[in-house]
Image (spheres, rainbow, N blue to C red):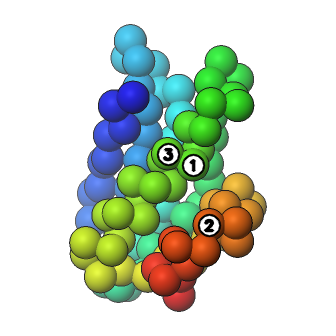
Amino acid sequence: MNIQHEFDSKKGAFYLEEGGKRLAEMAYVMAGDTKIIIEHTEVDDSLRGQGVGKKLQAQLVAYVREKGIKVVPLCPFAKATFDKVEEWQDVLF
């Protein structure tokens, strides 16, 4: 599974694309230089139940740890996942 990242200095996304079609995405927006707000997570029905959303979030967590950024999960999926995965909670704002 090749999760990619795009970022334009204000907003970005971690996503999975196959055949030129985006099948999964966790989108965020920057709030200043040290905070990311996760806005939404979408996963195509063809990938549901495969843990794709959690894999997107794992990539986001690795990215913010590397950059020293904190996270505000407005997305209900991301918030629920942070609540379940204690080892990721260090990145929360």
What's the amino acid at mark 1? Lys
Q: Which mark is residue 85?
A: 2
Nearest to the eye among marks 2 and 3: give it.
Answer: 2
Badge 3 vs badge 1, beta-carbon distance below 8 Å: yes
Q: Which mark is residue 79?
A: none
Could you say which disc has been placed on residue 55 in the image? 3
Q: Residue at x 34, y 31 (%)?
A: 2
Q: Residue 16 sits in which quadrant?
A: top left
- Residue 14 visible in the picture: yes
Where in the figure is residue 60, as x and y percent of width and height?
41, 59
Gap between marks 3 and 1, in whole Å? Answer: 4 Å
Give the camera-side residue of 24 and 51: 51
Structural crowding at the residue carrying mark 1, measured as other residues with C-alpha within 10 Å and reported as few (<14), some (14–19) or many (≥20): some
The answer to which of 67 and 81 lies nearer the viewer is: 81
Local SS, label 2: loop
Q: Determine the residue positioned at 62% across, 30% down.
A: 50
Taking the image as shown, residue 53 lies to the left or right of residue 64, namely right
* Residue 74 horizontal/vertical position (percent): 66, 69
What amino acid is at disc 3?
A: Lys
Q: Tell me how far mark 2 sits from mark 1, CA to CA.
A: 10 Å
Residue bearing mark 1: 54
Dot 3: element: helix
Q: Nearer the viewer, residue 6 or 49?
A: 49
* Rendering coords of residue 67 (x, y %): 25, 75
Going by the numbered disc 2, the residue's amino acid type is Val
Secondary structure under the numbered disc 1 in the rendered image: helix
Is 45 above or below relative to 85? above
Q: Are marks 2 and 1 in contact (CB under 8 Å)?
A: yes
- Judged from this view, the residue extending furthest toward the top is 19
